[in-house]
Amino acid sequence: MSITYHTEGVNMPNIKRQATSQWIKSVASSYGKKVGEIAYIFCSDKKILEVNRQYLEHDYYTDIITFDYTEENKIAGDIFISLDTVKTNSEQFNTNYTEELHRTIIHGILHLCGINDKGPGEREIMEAAENKALSCLKIDEIQKE
């Protein structure tokens, strides 16, 4: 059971890995899931486009691609996050970059927990789940200081 953080062609974002991993485990647990092997790969728009084309046959940029290897109640997967798109999204939605990054980080976990965002009404469910998870992170950070 481990959560690992990697980069490909970008600098590692300034995240508290241990606190972030604890938060991820806590969110997964709230959905009755245990954390297995999860690898985050922070990358550029160029890399995520390459992954999107190669594995999903999609020809567009995105902020996150989640490869799901979950078995039963143990979530596992490879999660690619484009830091370029996270930055663009934070500017476009007028949000804090760190918050947008954590929203994207937890978005992948929520997918692994079984929450979708493509069908009718699903985007709103995903957004509510992201907001709930982000509110837990803020409480945790306040408590640790």
Image (cartoon, grey):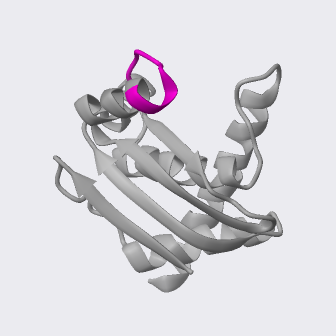
145 over 16 or under it: above or below: below
Picture quadrant where residue 128 is located? top right
Expressed as whole percent of the image width and height from the top left, the position of residue 115 reads 76, 44
Q: What residue sits 35% from the left and 65% below the top?
A: 5
Note whether residue 38 is visible: yes
Residue 62 appearing in the image: no
Residue 74 vertical placement versus 48 (above, below): below
Q: Quadrant of the N terminus?
A: bottom right
Taking 93 as reference, is 5 left or right? Answer: left
- Find residue 84 and report its horizontal and vertical position in percent: 27, 34
Residue 98 is situated, as x and y percent measured from the top left of the image, at 37, 52
Q: Quadrant of residue 117?
A: top right
Q: Residue at x 30, y 62 (%)?
A: 6
- Label the magenta part by its dominant secondary structure: loop
Query: Does the segment drawn in magenta span residue 59?
Result: yes
Magenta residues, start to end: 54-62
Q: Residue at x 54, y 71 (%)?
A: 37
Residue 68, image x, y percentages: 62, 51
